[in-house]
Amino acid sequence: MSIKRIAINTGGGDAPGLNAVIRAATLAALNRGWECYGIRDGFNGIFFPERYEDNGVMRLTRDRVRGIAHLGGTMLGTTNKGNPMRFPLHMPDGTTREIDRTGEILEYFAKKQIDALISIGGDGSLTIAHALAKQGLKVVGVPKTIDNDLDKTFTTFGFDTAVSFATECLDRLHTTAESHQRLMVVEMMGRYAGWIALHSGISGGAHAILIPEIPFDLDKVAEKIRQRDEYGRAYSLVVVAEGASVIDGQRAVMAPAEAGQAERLGGVGEQVARALAKKTGKDTRTVVLGHLVRGGSPTSFDRLAALRFGAAAVRALNEGQTDVMVSLAFPNVQYVPLEQVAGRMKAVPLDCDTLTTGRDMGICFGD
Ligand code: F6P
C-alpha cells in the first residue's frame, strides 16, 4: 500500500535538533505528495484532544516548518510521563495504576487514515515505536538523546550540542577555579551513561572524570588533587556524571520512579564535593549544569544529522520499510531493526580510545 499521510511525534526529554528532524521529514513527505501531521506532547495529542486548540494533532505545512531547523526544543512538545504502554491512571482511592493505551493509537491512525508514524525519541520512545510496529503500525524511529546512550547508531543528535556547551562551561570554570585555587566539582546529565561527562571532560581539560561505567574511589581522586597541588597547580576540575557512583555505593537519586515515569538522578556532585573537601581541605564549589546542556540551538553537526535523519525516515517509509530506526553509520545513514535498539543501552566501552586518551593524558577516572 502506498503512503499518502504520515504523522510525526517527539517523545521523552527534548534535545537540540528535534525541530530540524521535523522540518526535513515534513518537507521530504510534502515533496512526495504526502500529507504530514504532528502529534502534540508525545501521544497526549491523541489521548487528550480536548486540551488543544488544534485537537492535539497539527497539520504540518511548509509554512509551519519554516525557520525552525536552528531552534532548540520541539515545536510539537514532548513528555516523559506519557508512556502509552504503561500509562498512569489515577484511581478514585488515590492510588495509580498503569494501563496499556497503545490500542487507542492504532485506532486513531486507522480512523484518520494515517499510514505511518515517524517517532523521534530515545530508548523509551523507540521501545514504544517497536511495540506499535509489532501491532501492525508502520513506524520508523529516529534516534534522539543528549545522553548518546542508544545502541546501533554512531551518535544521536543532541549529544554534540550538549558536549559543546558543557565544554564551554568547563573552559569558563578553569579561570575562576584557578584564580581562587579552588576545587570545582561539575555534575552533568547523561543518565546511566558517561558520554557527556567523558567527551566534555576530556575536551574541557578536566583533571578527574567520574562516569557510571567506572565506579570510583574518592581517595584516588583526592590523591590526584594533592599531586596537582604539589606541582603548583592549586586548582582542580572534577567532572561527575549524574549516574556515577562510588565503588559498592548507590547512585544519587533525586526522585524515585513513579507510574509512567523513570527515576530522576541528581545530587552526586554535591556528595563528591563534600567528601573531597574533607579529604583535601580545599575550598570547594559544586556546579550542576543540569538542563542547561539540553537547551539552545543545535550545533551544525547535530543540525545536519537531524536533517539527514528526518529525510532518511521518509525515504525508509517510501521504500516500504517499517519497524526500523534511522541510524548514523558514519559517514552514511542506514536502517537498523528497532528490536536491536529497544531496551538496550549503549554504555561507554571501557576500551574505547577516548577513555584511553584520557588515561594517557593523566586524567583520573577514580579507579
Ligand atoms: O535523557 C535526557 C536527560 O536529560 C538525562 O540526561 C536526565 O537524567 C533526564 O533526561 C532528566 O529528565 P527530566 O527532564 O525529566 O528532569
Image: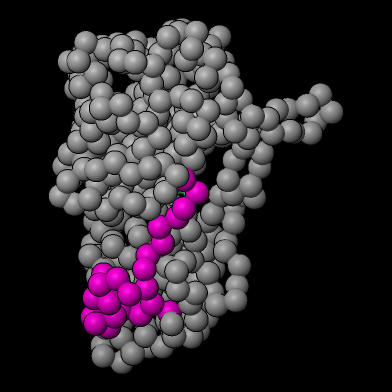
In this orientation, does residue 322 appear?
Answer: yes
Residue 155 rendering spot, x and y as whole percentages: 28, 51
> Which residue appears farthest toward the right when viewing the image?
93
**Does residue 88 sit above or below 144 in this rendering?**
above
**Does residue 145 sit above or below 64 in this rendering?**
below
The residue segment tinted magenta is: 342-366
Nearest the eye: 28 or 212: 28
If the image is split into quadrants, where does the C terminus sit?
bottom left
Nearest the eye: 165 or 3: 3
Q: How many marks?
A: 0
Residue 115 rendering spot, x and y as whole percentages: 39, 16
In this orientation, does residue 41 appear?
Answer: no
Residue 235 rendering spot, x and y as whole percentages: 31, 77
Which residue corresponds to the image point at 69% horizontal and 34% vertical from the top-left? 98
> Which residue appears farthest toward the bottom when viewing the image?
230
State whether the magenta stretch is mostly helix, strand or loop. loop
Which residue corresponds to the image point at 31% horizontal and 11% vertical from the top-left? 4
**Residue 330 located left or right of residue 247:** left
**Residue 161 located left or right of residue 243:** left
Which residue corresponds to the image point at 49% horizontal and 17% vertical from the top-left? 45
User: Quadrant of residue 59 in the image?
Assistant: top left
**Residue 261 located left or right of residue 93:** left
Task: Please say whether residue 220 is one of the residues in the magenta stretch.
Answer: no
Residue 316 rendering spot, x and y as whole percentages: 27, 30
**Does residue 340 sit above or below 89 in this rendering?**
below
Task: Please say whether residue 353 is one of the residues in the magenta stretch.
Answer: yes
Which residue corresponds to the image point at 27% horizontal and 53% vertical from the top-left? 154
User: Quadrant of residue 77 in the image?
Assistant: top left
**Does residue 229 sit above or below 265 in this rendering?**
below
If the image is split into quadrants, where does the N terminus sit?
top left
Name the colour scheme: one colour
